[in-house]
Image (cartoon, rainbow, N blue to C red):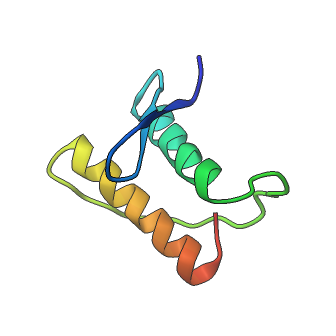
Amino acid sequence: MKRYEQFPHTADIGVRAFGKDLKELFENAAFAMFDIIADLENLTGETTETFNLEAPNNEELLVSWLDELLYSFYTKQLI
């Protein structure tokens, strides 16, 4: 199964992420975002971050998740 696909969008870049479950879907959405904005070639995976997020539904949780990842990327240079 492919992780994601891009599609044209009038406001920005559209991404459709895929996953066999919610965890994989969130991982692939994050991968898609960073695959578009950063170089993922030399990532080591040595640093981990924990996020505690709540939202009224999965769609809003995904948006909060991606927002937190972007915040860490821009403020701490973490992917």
Q: Residue at x 53, y 42 (%)?
A: 27
* Residue found farthest to the front: 10
Pick the residue in front: 24 or 41. Answer: 41
Does 7 sit above or below residue 50? above
Does 30 sit above or below residue 74? above
Horizontal side, residue 52 vs residue 69: left or right:
left
Horizontal side, residue 9 vs residue 19: left or right:
left
Give the quadrant of the C terminus: bottom right
- Residue 63 percent across, percent down from the top left: 32, 54
Horizontal side, residue 23 vs residue 10: left or right:
right
- Residue 28 percent across, percent down from the top left: 53, 38
Horizontal side, residue 78 vs residue 18: left or right:
right
Q: Which residue is drawn at 64% across and 48% down?
A: 35
* Residue found farthest to the bottom: 75
Q: Residue at x 34, y 49 (%)?
A: 62
Give the quadrant of the N terminus: top right
Q: Residue at x 78, y 63 (%)?
A: 46
* Residue found farthest to the top: 1
- Residue 19 percent across, percent down from the top left: 48, 26
Q: In which quarter of the image is residue 37?
A: bottom right
